[in-house]
Image: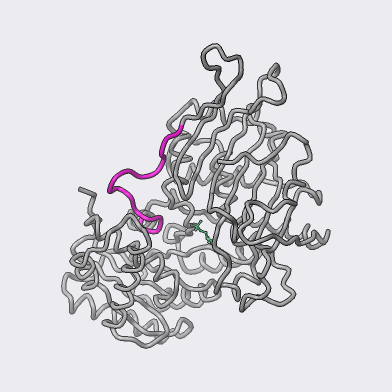
Amino acid sequence: MFQVIQNSFLFTIFGASGDLAKIKIFPSLYALATQHRLPKQYFIVGYARSKKTNEEFRQEFRESIKKYCQKGSKIAFCNEIIEELLSHVFYFSGQYTELGDFERYFEFLENLSKKEGGGPPETHITYFSVPPSTFQPILQNIAFARKSREDDIRVVLEKPFGEDQASAEQLFHFISRFYDEKQIFLLDHYLGKTAVQSILTLRHHNSVLNLLLEGKNIASIQITAHETVGVEDRAGYFDNVGLIKDMFQSHITQLLAMITMSIPIKADEKSFHREKQSILAALDFTPKKHNIFRAQYKGYKDISGAKKDSQTETYFGAKLKIDRESWYGVPIFIRTGKRMKTKLTSLVVEFKKLPFQPEDTEPNLLIFELQPREMIHIKLLNQFGKSSEYHEIGTSESIACRGDDCLPEHSLLILDVLERNKLHFLSFPEILESWRVTDAILKFIEEKEIPLHEYNLGDHSPEGIQGMFQKSHDRWFEA
Ligand code: BG6
């Protein structure tokens, strides 16, 4: 039996007609329902501009869950559960920029709880499933239209936060005018992945890992985030953004922080955020042309929404460093790309060899495979029988959920919001630090006119990325 959410709540989804809502949010709420975690009294309200009835909205909700379950998810489709869930689902049509529509919306909510009984819900979660350009008007309109300043309103915003450090800072000032920091949940869905959360959990509970994860023992850290999907119908958005902002700025810098940060003694959100910010503040790259690699997949420019002469990268590699004595001389190699041969997100720690070990022996590796498989591996060398040759042995263990405990990332994060737990969310200062290094890389690319290479669809890894390895024995270690 899973723990049932204690408080009654209202869950508003702004942008309820959009893809994020259909692909991620509706199925995540359903996943919570399948584990019988939802309380007796709750309302899920879709807010979007298009006109539709409750019934039409419920039908879209139902369809998106059906699609999700058919797509090989671990969650099975159950008609009874979905119909019970849908009896809590409602729809409201309004503009994002009209204060009057928000005033009507708050009236609607009041009437809803009166009509359905049970009194006003204790917590109001507002989930922003909308383009970032609409964050500010919605934030302001909620703040002006809400009936009472005492309401427990929590705001969930999903990355990207701004377009650079300056605009992120402006956004945070704007938010602070209307809300307390404790009401704001800044979401990067990578932090909701159980395998990603395991990095910190394993480090926090196992001294053997932390003793090893010190710069003096490490030859390199390598992060890979390859996807098989391309840009498809998101080119209108993606072409102005590029992969450095889309994947590196938040997802990859967060993975990097988790493996390199100091582990705080207290496992609370404040201590984690403090340490994460501190390591991100030390993250840097050496401005040398060979430390950056950019490429675009063939045919990208022909996608509808992409410019015919687009210089937007769909592949990005970089060599980074941490400006701290304890990490001196440890290169961090990252690579991320779309339309690759296989989907893989992994984090590899390459350990230094013993001083007397021959150059050509394999190094020890600690590998976190984060997706699609969720595994930790340790690679060691051993001699078998009388053989004088060393063989690599691996020890592997699954690091994600077990049995029927599995929940998709957005479900786990929604639970965290309801429990007011910000451990797996971002903090303003962390975001500003990751923008600082992202901005520096982008400026360098522009000033030095770093070329944009081309790669074939389904490449394992574009060839040119090897140029990042200046020392001849450096190479990518595959998970
Ligand atoms: C999103 C990016 O944040 O993450 C997408 O905007 C990318 O471009 C996606 O495809 C990758 O997420 P995941 O969970 O599939 O690795």
Give percent across and percent down for residue 396: 45, 33
Q: Would you place residue 477 above or below residue 335 in this image? A: above
Q: Would you place residue 351 above or below residue 69 in this image? A: above
For residue 242, what is the image quadrant? Answer: bottom right
Rendered residue at 42%/84% (across/down): 49
Does residue 281 belong to the magenta stretch? no
- Residue 432 shows in the view: no
Taking depth in this image into account, of 115 and 45 the one nearest to the observer is 45
Give percent across and percent down for residue 327: 67, 34
Rendered residue at 42%/65% (across/down): 155
Q: Tell me: 371 left or right of 33.
A: right
Give percent across and percent down for residue 179: 45, 65
Q: Tell me: 277 left or right of 22.
A: right
For residue 41, what is the image quadrant? Answer: bottom left
Q: How is the image coloured?
A: one colour
- Residue 48 shows in the view: yes
Q: Which image quarter is the C terminus in?
A: top right
Q: Would you place residue 323 above or below residue 315 in this image? A: above
**Magenta-tinted stretch:** 396-411
Does residue 410 belong to the magenta stretch? yes
Give percent across and percent down for residue 273: 51, 46
Q: Tell me: 373 left or right of 303.
A: left
Taking depth in this image into account, of 191 and 389 the one nearest to the observer is 389
Q: Would you place residue 65 above or below residue 393 in this image? A: below
Taking depth in this image into account, of 247 and 348 the one nearest to the observer is 348
Rendered residue at 61%/70% (across/down): 238
Which residue of the protein is positioned furthest toward the top in this rendering?
386
Which residue of the protein is positioned furthest toward the left in this rendering?
117
